Image (cartoon, grey):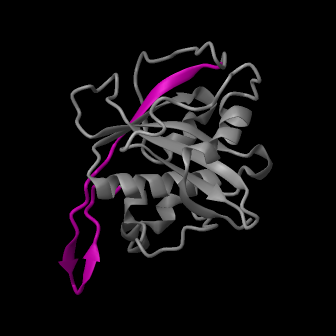
Amino acid sequence: MKFEVRELAAGETHELRRSVSADGRADLPTMHYELDDASDSWHLGAVDPSGRVVGISSFYREACPARPEVPESFQLQFMAVDPSVQREGIGSSILSEGLRRLQSMGAKLLWASARDNAVPFYERFGFEVVPDSASLPASTGRPHHLILLEIQQQERREVGGGDRAPRACRHWCCRPRDGRIAGDRRSPSRWCRRRSRR
């Protein structure tokens, strides 16, 4: 399907927050989060040609409980895709763009409390599970683990007339900045310039 990844207002994320992230709970008075409107918070999502929001994510500048000493840490919350359009590359496109933005901002760490069944998705982007971090939030009753990703700041250099990513590349970071985001279904690793030269 066709979609565009763009920045959203906090209110545009609320419908999917309730139906997906909160499992459709009707007893919650609001899906507004206290940091939604902070100056250093932002929200990314995927929108289809009709204007319907089909994927969401929110990024908050928050210290990681497992790595409180790391500056410039961000928490990822409310990552969700409309169940009717899952497995279309929407979540991967949103997270890839979020990581690109965090890298350009000089962020050092991204962390989240992820449902156990979603952990393999995040591991494909290089996230690691924090040992002994299992939890069972009362709001969902589903097991979660703390996950984190150290964001590598890439220093590009001219080699043979072109730039090349260093060997520490985590693949998503090699994505061309002028590359098309809307509807792109390729996995992050296929953007990697190192792999394309092998």
Q: Position of residue 90 (x, y in %)?
A: 64, 55
Is 17 situated above or below 84? above
Say which residue appears at 65% left-offset and 50% top-offset. Answer: 55
Is-magenta flag for residue 145? Answer: yes
Q: Is residue 171 visible?
A: no
**Quadrant of res 79:** top right
Quadrant containing the N terminus in the rendered view: bottom right
Q: Position of residue 142 (x, y in %)?
A: 65, 19
For the record, the magenta segment spans: 142-169
Left-right relation of 81 to 103: right
Is 182 situated above or below 21? below
Say which residue appears at 74% left-offset and 19% top-offset. Answer: 27
**Quadrant of res 175:** bottom left
Q: Residue furthest bottom?
A: 161
Q: Nearer the viewer, residue 145 or 43?
A: 43
Say which residue appears at 39% left-offset and 35% top-offset. Answer: 148
Q: Residue furthest right?
A: 84
Quadrant containing the C terminus in the rendered view: bottom left
Q: Position of residue 71 (x, y in %)?
A: 22, 36
